[in-house]
Image (cartoon, coloured by chain):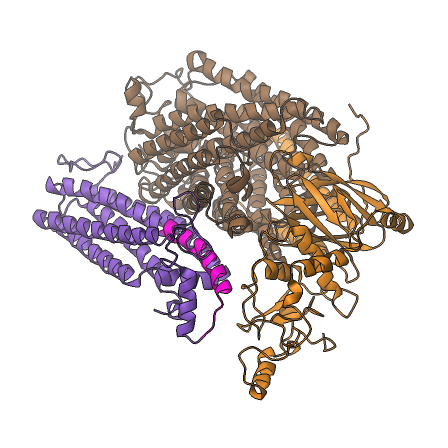
């Protein structure tokens, strides 16, 4: 009787054998990417939940921790990433409308902005290294009771001191002993800081890899109005990574900042 | 091989038969439904076996039947749930006059301290007929305090007190197991609970060479570590007076109200800036690494005895939500009044966390 | 009944997915879901035998109360390795990755899964995870228990926890990709006429299991990552000495691991839903209810995790909520059992090997499931938690349930996958031996558990010995029952009777194509017009070709 197999002689070269039509392939692939992003949400979600639980448990320490990371750089990164999402969306549009050169430039733009993000992140990590805000006792410097360096320069990254100073600015006398205890607990904040931003950065690096591959294919002219699925999927992935940052930034940098001062 | 094998545990506590009753009910339900299903499928397999001339009858289903066999199991489940919950609730409420024993689990042994100062390792002597509440903590990983004959079990956590309580009813020696995997000698972390009738128990208590009651050991530690420097009943003391503290609600600097229970006292020793009492400054140093879990328990016992009432006011409450707001004295109000009279930074005249003699 | 003319003797099709291409590259780089299913079949069988060997060693050790066979450390590694292998490398992938991979595309009427290359990646990830796990084992094993409770696993165990955790995380991604593939395939690639209401229940079950796979598995991944970070870098997430909370580990771990048991059992239930109608020649009773019960189990399964933690130090109120919800999750399973039983009523029943396994499943799963009610009852759980009662309960549902269903499914679809029938007499014998051995092994453990024998004990008080000896005796019988299929299945590949397209006269699109199927499953994509399980309508389901 009837059959639903495509019999048109001009099979789009990118039509995979298991699909009947380009439309079905596009549909299924996009759906698949959304399902994958859902799994990523569950993974980051687990991490965020643990973070929030500890935020409640060690509130003053997390306030101190949040205050010790740079809001300016975090904000800069946010702008960079939003910009890269814009260029990515433009790249997808360019693919849909068959503009090969635009695709390439927008992809390159996205990759540059992504790299800028990673560069700023590297700088932030370096700052934390410098101030010895590295949790755990495997990596070199170690975390001390005052939340600073074990080196002779005790002022650098000395969270306990910062807490006392902020207290003075707010006309509160915070004894050094209490500040020291809070500073020690910021180690947990930094564990989450590195885990969350690290996992995010890892996803960004993978994203850059995906973008390079897309760039290669785009430069070969593979995408058009008929077939731009890989670009669309790449776009979805990139936007997702952006959205994760949109959550990370307030959760790590912004919450309760006013309590801690500038 | 030991051919004398029992198939049902001893019933040696007041809870045992309650738990067993629910168990037997469930055994009946399980047996009934398993046999029913097994019988049905075997019966159908035989009665409706494939043979010529007999064709299967195509039945789509029956919504009524689906509802029936959803609702009935749901109903039975609810009965089981309520029954189980009632038993559990009772298990979470130790009676007020319970004998309080402290237990520490560590890889791979149990240490118990009696209020009279007696210490035991891997053995626990308890009397019949009197509720016993064991307050437990771990020194390392998660263990679990399990006495099958009492039907009691509680995971023992590091850094946090938990409790288990029971009333032993039958003298004898019963197994104590650690039932949360904890490493190499997990199966060796066992002991004996020795239940004695009250006279024998009294004899046993008297026979040991205790160095003094647990509370007096705690008092010694309290002085040894310099706690009395700040925690004094006089005015000008820099720390709250601990008399009458145990079991009372406490208002903190951030206006939270917490209950001064075992966990609160332990936390105040190890992380004093976590909960600072209203009207005081956060200047207490931490004693983590200085004071052992055993000593903390002794100090807690000592503080309990600083209550003007002999009995433990704590046992009928488990959470601070039980505390009504007007029970908590407004330290800040009192301090403000004090400061208006004498403008000074530190609060004048120490108020205990809860003035004794006020309503509970 | 079938058409009157005697059908010609069945013949193997000339070209099918097994002989379409030869050479190792054609297998290791295949995109054919059927070949990937066979690859999985080999790997999963390996891990089943490995996990089973550890079980045999455990039972041998427990013959005597004083633990004379192995040291305590070795014993601790044995039960850990048994659990890890069985849970992560056998039970979780068993039905979905073998039978599911093979059948889901055919059952929905399409040429392959939505993403064949990702399907192959799934297998490679599984192998990578398995290899990490083997490395951990060979380097000395892990002794934390498959539950990896902190702080023991992060701060105290001296074994290769991180390597094992990495293996499990990688295998988890394998599971996620399989689930993703199934979901997209079922949503977007059904044949014309194949509405949701016409899907075989096997597809519904795998779909529900896939929902759990994609939502739950990422959480175990992040939990183990955090555990590995804590262990490697001494940061405090779960270890109180470093400021962490051990109960948080338990919450995060069980948030996945409880739904995981439904990933394991749902596909097995799907198998039963296919076998019982076929050998009763009768449509399934209550199709809609059985289909939706799978979804209900998947949904409810996510909100009961803390019933593993009633004594762990959670609040009374949490405990009450989780106990209540745990009863809710039991009900859909009960509904399935009743529906299967009702399917047999007034059927025309043939006791083939798959049917024997299905009936065993129904009985044993009922017992296992009902003993779950004991554990959900708060006051009672206090006593039986962490004892052999729990072990008996989950072995009843996992071995008496899941493994039984897996074996039943293998037998049922063996002719389809290989074109050959397995020999019926040895198969029935193996099923009966398995049933007897299984009950003898695990029933005494209920009694041991109520007596108070704790889990994970290398030594035990002497009064528990008789029951332990009975259990070991059962295990020796059970192992025979499990090993026999290995032999006769392999034998059947060369000497088994040729099966033909539909040896069981079953409904379902898979039986409308050749045995073994061609690489592209169908010579022409079917158009579906009939309800599923349309037994009794002239014997064979007329599907329009």
Instruction: State yes or no: residue A209 in magenta.
Output: no
Instruction: State yes or no: residue A177 in magenta.
Output: yes
Give x and y (percent) for residue B99.
Answer: 79, 56
Give x and y (percent) for residue C412.
Answer: 48, 26
Chain coloured orange:
B
The residue at the point 25 percent across, 45 percent down is: A207
Q: Who is closer to the viewer here, C349 or C44? A: C44
Give x and y (percent) for residue A196.
Answer: 37, 51
Left or right of C7? Residue C339 is right
Q: Who is closer to the viewer here, C362 or B46? A: C362
Left or right of B240? Residue C33 is left
Most extreme residue toward the top, as rendered? C495
Task: Tell me the shade of chain A.
Answer: purple
Give x and y (percent) for residue C64.
Answer: 71, 24
Q: Who is closer to the viewer here, C363 or B60? A: C363
Task: Tell me the shade of chain C.
Answer: brown
Q: Which residues are magenta?
A: A172-196
Task: From the image, give the main secondary structure of the stretch colored magenta.
Answer: helix
């Amino acid at each position: 009787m009837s059959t639903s197999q495509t019999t048109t002689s001009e099979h789009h070269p990118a039509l995979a054998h298991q699909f009947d039509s380009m439309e079905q392939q596009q549909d299924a692939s996009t759906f698949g990417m959304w399902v994958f992003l859902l799994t990523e949400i569950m993974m980051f979600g687990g991490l965020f939940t643990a973070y929030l639980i500890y935020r409640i448990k060690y509130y003053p320490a997390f306030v101190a921790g949040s205050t010790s990371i740079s809001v300016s750089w975090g904000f800069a990164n946010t702008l960079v990433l939003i910009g890269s999402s814009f260029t990515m969306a433009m790249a997808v549009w360019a693919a849909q409308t068959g503009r090969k050169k635009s695709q390439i430039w927008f992809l390159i733009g996205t990759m540059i902005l992504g790299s800028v993000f990673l560069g700023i992140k590297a700088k932030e990590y370096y700052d934390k290294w410098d101030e010895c805000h590295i949790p755990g006792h495997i990596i070199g410097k170690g975390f001390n009771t005052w939340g600073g360096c074990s080196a002779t320069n005790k002022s650098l990254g000395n969270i306990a001191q910062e807490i006392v100073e902020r207290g003075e600015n707010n006309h509160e006398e915070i004894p050094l002993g209490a500040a020291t205890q809070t500073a020690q607990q910021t180690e947990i904040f930094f564990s989450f800081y590195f885990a969350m931003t690290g996992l995010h950065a890892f996803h960004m690096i993978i994203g850059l890899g995906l973008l390079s591959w897309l760039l290669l294919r785009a430069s070969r002219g593979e995408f058009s109005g008929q077939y731009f699925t890989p670009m669309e999927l790449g776009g979805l992935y990139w936007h997702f990574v952006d959205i994760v940052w949109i959550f990370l930034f307030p959760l790590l940098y912004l919450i309760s900042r006013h309590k801690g001062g500038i | 091989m030991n051919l004398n094998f029992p198939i049902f545990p001893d019933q040696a506590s007041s809870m045992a038969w309650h738990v067993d009753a629910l168990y037997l009910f469930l055994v009946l339900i399980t047996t009934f439904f398993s046999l029913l299903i097994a019988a049905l499928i075997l019966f159908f397999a035989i009665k409706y076996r494939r043979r010529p001339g007999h064709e299967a009858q195509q039945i789509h289903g029956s919504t009524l039947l689906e509802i029936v066999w959803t609702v009935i199991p749901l109903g039975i489940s609810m009965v089981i749930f309520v029954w189980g919950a009632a038993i559990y609730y009772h298990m979470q409420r130790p009676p007020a006059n319970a004998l309080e024993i402290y237990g520490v689990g560590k890889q791979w042994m149990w240490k118990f301290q009696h209020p009279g100062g007696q210490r035991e390792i891997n053995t626990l002597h308890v009397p019949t007929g009197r509720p016993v509440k064991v307050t437990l903590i771990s020194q390392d990983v998660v263990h679990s305090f399990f006495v099958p004959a009492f039907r009691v079990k509680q995971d023992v956590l590091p850094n946090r007190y938990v409790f288990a309580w029971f009333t032993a009813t039958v003298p004898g020696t019963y197994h104590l197991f650690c039932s949360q995997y904890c490493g190499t000698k997990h199966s060796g972390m066992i002991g004996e609970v020795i239940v004695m009738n009250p006279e024998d128990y009294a004899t046993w208590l008297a026979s040991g060479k205790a160095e003094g009651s647990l509370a007096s050991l705690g008092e010694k530690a309290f002085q040894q570590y310099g706690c009395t420097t700040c925690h004094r009943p006089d005015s000008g003391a820099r720390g709250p007076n601990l008399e009458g503290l145990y079991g009372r609600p406490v208002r903190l600097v951030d206006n939270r109200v917490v209950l001064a229970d075992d966990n609160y006292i332990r936390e105040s020793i190890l992380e004093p800036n976590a909960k600072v009492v209203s009207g005081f400054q956060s200047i207490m140093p931490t004693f983590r690494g200085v004071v052992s879990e055993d000593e903390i328990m002794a100090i807690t016992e000592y503080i309990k005895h600083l209550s003007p009432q002999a009995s433990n006011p704590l046992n009928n409450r488990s959470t601070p939500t039980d505390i009504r707001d007007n029970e908590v004295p407004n330290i800040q109000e009192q301090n403000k009044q004090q400061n208006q009279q004498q403008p000074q930074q530190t609060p004048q005249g120490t108020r205990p966390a809860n003035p004794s003699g006020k309503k509970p | 009944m079938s058409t009157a003319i005697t059908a010609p003797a069945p013949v193997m099709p000339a070209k099918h997915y097994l002989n379409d291409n030869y050479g190792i590259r054609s297998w290791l780089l295949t995109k054919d879901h059927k070949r990937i299913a066979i690859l999985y079949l080999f790997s999963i069988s390996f891990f089943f035998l490995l996990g089973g060997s550890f079980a045999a060693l455990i039972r041998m050790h427990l013959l005597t109360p004083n633990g004379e066979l192995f040291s305590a450390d070795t014993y601790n590694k044995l039960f850990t390795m048994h659990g890890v292998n069985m849970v992560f490398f056998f039970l979780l992938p068993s039905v979905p990755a073998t039978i599911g991979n093979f059948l889901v595309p055919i059952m929905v009427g399409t040429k392959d899964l939505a993403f064949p290359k990702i399907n192959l990646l799934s297998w490679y990830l599984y192998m990578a995870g398995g290899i990490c796990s083997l490395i951990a084992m060979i380097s000395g094993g892990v002794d934390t228990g498959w539950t990896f409770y902190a702080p023991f696993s992060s701060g105290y165990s001296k074994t290769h926890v991180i390597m094992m955790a990495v293996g499990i995380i990688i295998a988890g991604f394998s599971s996620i990709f399989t689930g993703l593939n199934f979901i997209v395939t079922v949503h977007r690639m059904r044949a014309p006429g194949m509405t949701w209401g016409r899907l075989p229940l096997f597809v519904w079950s795998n779909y529900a299991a896939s929902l759990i796979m994609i939502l739950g598995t990422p959480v175990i991944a992040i939990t183990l990552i955090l555990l590995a970070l804590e262990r490697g870098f001494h940061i405090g997430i779960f270890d109180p000495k470093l400021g962490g909370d051990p109960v948080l580990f338990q919450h995060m771990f069980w948030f996945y691991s409880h739904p995981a048991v439904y990933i394991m059992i749902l596909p097995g239930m799907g198998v039963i839903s296919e076998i019982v109608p076929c050998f009763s020649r009768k449509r399934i009773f209550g199709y809609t209810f059985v289909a939706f019960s799978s979804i209900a189990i998947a949904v409810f399964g996510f909100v009961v995790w803390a019933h593993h933690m009633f004594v762990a130090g959670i609040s009374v109120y949490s405990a009450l909520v989780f106990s209540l919800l745990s009863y809710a999750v039991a009900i859909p399973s009960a509904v399935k059992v009743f529906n299967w039983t009702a399917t047999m009523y007034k059927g025309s029943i043939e006791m083939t090997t798959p049917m024997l396994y299905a009936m065993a499943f129904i009985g044993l799963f009922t017992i296992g499931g009902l003993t779950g009610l004991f554990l959900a009852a708060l006051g009672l759980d206090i006593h039986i938690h962490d004892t052999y009662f729990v072990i008996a309960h989950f072995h009843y549902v996992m071995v008496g349930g899941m493994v039984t269903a897996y074996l039943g499914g293998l037998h049922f679809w063996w002719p389809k996958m290989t074109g050959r029938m397995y020999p019926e007499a040895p198969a029935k014998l193996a099923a009966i031996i398995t049933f007897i051995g299984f009950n003898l092994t695990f029933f005494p453990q209920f009694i041991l558990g109520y007596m108070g024998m704790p889990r994970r004990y290398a030594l035990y008080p002497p009064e528990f010995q008789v029951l332990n000896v009975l259990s070991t005796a059962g295990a020796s019988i059970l192992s025979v029952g499990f090993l026999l299929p290995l032999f006769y299945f392999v034998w059947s590949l060369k000497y088994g009777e040729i099966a033909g397209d539909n040896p069981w006269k079953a409904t379902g699109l898979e039986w409308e194509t050749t045995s073994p199927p061609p690489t592209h499953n169908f010579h022409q994509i079917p158009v579906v017009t009939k309800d599923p399980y349309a037994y009794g309508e002239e014997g064979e389901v007329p599907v329009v070709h």
